[in-house]
Amino acid sequence: MADEAQALPSAFEFSQDISTQEAPPPLPKGVYLASIEAAEAKVSATSGNTYADITFNISPDQFPADYSAIQQDAVKIHHRTMVLSKDDARTRYGIRKFCEAIRCPVSRKLDLNDFLGKSAMLTIDHRQYQGVDQPEIKSVQPA
């Protein structure tokens, strides 16, 4: 017999008053060494295309001093621009350039598991999402 799911509480308590919480500053614009900790194929809800959702991890030792005082944990940032479901010259070239940047050899086959642990230099910029600045990967370059 399957285990019954435990009921989750409906009330939660936090260390500080939520009604006065300000938005934390985003990771400052700049260039950061990052490593890939996850890579999986997903389907876009808007286009229907299959793409690679690549999770980069930027460790706190890469942060500027004033930001590391605010953010003690690593920052995870997603790269979601690599389309996998189209077999055309533009798509293959984009995959090639990304793989060159992370130093991952490829041929006719691409295994996203080969990305795990690879490093790259990420250029971080900001974009607005729901009125709040969010870090965004502008480019991926070799480390």
Image (cartoon, helix red, strand yellow):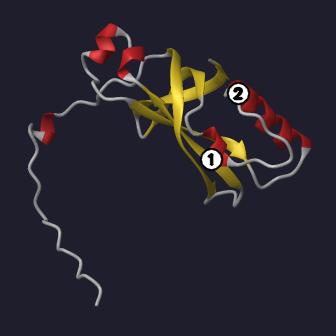
Horizontal and vertical percent position of residue 26: 39, 25
Q: Report the disc number at residue 87.
A: none
SS assignment at label 1: helix
Q: Which comes before the other along the chain, label 2 or label 1?
A: 2
The residue carrying mark 2 is: 103
Picture quarter containing residue 27? Answer: top left
The correct choice, above or below, for 36 with respect to 123 in the image is below
Observer-nearest residue: 44 or 7?
7
* Quadrant location, the N terminus: bottom left
Horizontal and vertical percent position of residue 21: 18, 34
- Does residue 22 appear to the left or right of 19 in the view shown? right
The residue carrying mark 1 is: 113
What kind of residue is marked 1? Answer: Asn
Residue situated furthest top in the rendering: 65
Which residue is located at x 84 percent, y 35 percent? 93
Number of residues whose C-alpha sits closer than 10 Å to that of mark 2, classed few (under 14), some (14–19) or many (20 or more): some
Which residue is located at x 14 percent, y 41 percent? 18
SS assignment at label 2: loop
Alpha carbons under labels 2 and 1: distance apart:
14 Å
Horizontal and vertical percent position of residue 8: 17, 68
Which residue is located at x 70 percent, y 42 percent? 82
- Does residue 46 appear to the left or right of 1 in the view shown? right
- Does residue 69 appear to the left or right of 108 in the view shown? left
What kind of residue is marked 2? Answer: Arg
* Quadrant location, the C terminus: top right
Observer-nearest residue: 39 or 104?
104
